[in-house]
Image (cartoon, rainbow, N blue to C red):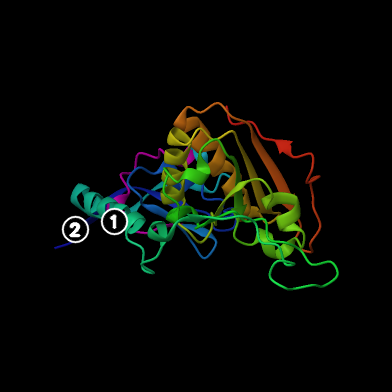
Amino acid sequence: MTHTNIRKLISIDEDRCDGCGLCVPACAEGAIQVVNGKARLIDDRLCDGLGACLGECPQGALLLEEREGTQFDEEAVRQHQEAQALAATSLPCGCPSTTMTEFEPRDYREAGVERAGAITSQLRHWPVQLTLVPPAAPFLKNADLLLAADCAPFVYADFHRDFVRGRAVLVACPKLDSYATHLERLTEILKSAAVKSITVTRVEVGCCRGLTNMAAEAIRNSGADLPLYEAVLGVKGDVKTDPFKYEEVSHG
């Protein structure tokens, strides 16, 4: 039987929340997730009421309040964490690291395609989704890493020429994907791959800032000493920062 009582629980002000996702990894129990662009307490049983996540919200959208809720359940937390760990390694498509490959960037002329202004793909490896890339992938070793928001290549026409060229590419979304899962995978990559630098390409919308925050946190967690750069793209195809003079982001 589920028991309820009056106790301290996290409350989230939806008007202030911009969906950045910083509160997600701050909750060790996994009680908070970003759903439809807003942070949500997904289950009272997972919230211990200690408020470890409070200081991580730049918008001040989190607070502790006393209200009726289901009792904290350590067993529910354990099962939830196990389910998250399983989701991180079990992929519904069945593809991935088993089809990992490296290749030379494609030249349209070699494919018999001649047209003025044709842009040649600069991608040199597969897969690219962060969840699917094993930390030991050879194309990550000593690489300059491009961490791209899912939407970034669609808003900027010359994305391959200005960003993909010469970099190992990882793709992630801090809003729709599991922030905690991505953070763990990126941290593992930085611990094992001797990455030389990270450049984050994100869109100007608020929730996309979480990708830069994720990269900075992964650098701190891994103990790596490498520069972090950010290029911000406008939704209308413009670049808010110079793509050839990336803004270095503090991660200390």
Query: Callout 2: helix, strand or loop?
Result: loop
Q: Residue 66: percent from the left, percent from the top?
A: 36, 48
**Is residue 165 among what the camera can see?**
yes
Q: Residue furthest right?
A: 116
Q: Residue at x 29, y 56 (%)?
A: 86
Give the foreground label among 1 and 2: 1
Q: Is 51 contained in the magenta span?
A: yes
Q: Residue at x 79, y 50 (%)?
A: 240
**In this picture, which residue range is highlighted in magenta?**
40-54
Q: Residue 173: percent from the left, percent from the top?
A: 55, 57
Question: Which secondary structure dominates the residues rendered in magenta?
Answer: loop
Question: Which of the pair 22/181 is nearer the observer?
Answer: 181
Quarter-wise, where is residue 132 in the image?
A: bottom left
Q: Which residue is mark 2?
A: 3
In the image, what residue type sits under mark 2? His
Quarter-wise, where is residue 160 in the image?
A: bottom right
Q: Earlier in the sequence, mark 1 or mark 2?
A: 2
Quarter-wise, where is residue 94 in the image?
A: bottom left
User: Which image quarter is the C terminus in?
Assistant: top right
Q: Residue at x 74, y 37 (%)?
A: 247
Vertical position of residue 193 compared to residue 121: above or below: above
**How far, Cα to Cα, is label 1 from label 2?**
28 Å
**Disc on res. 86:** 1
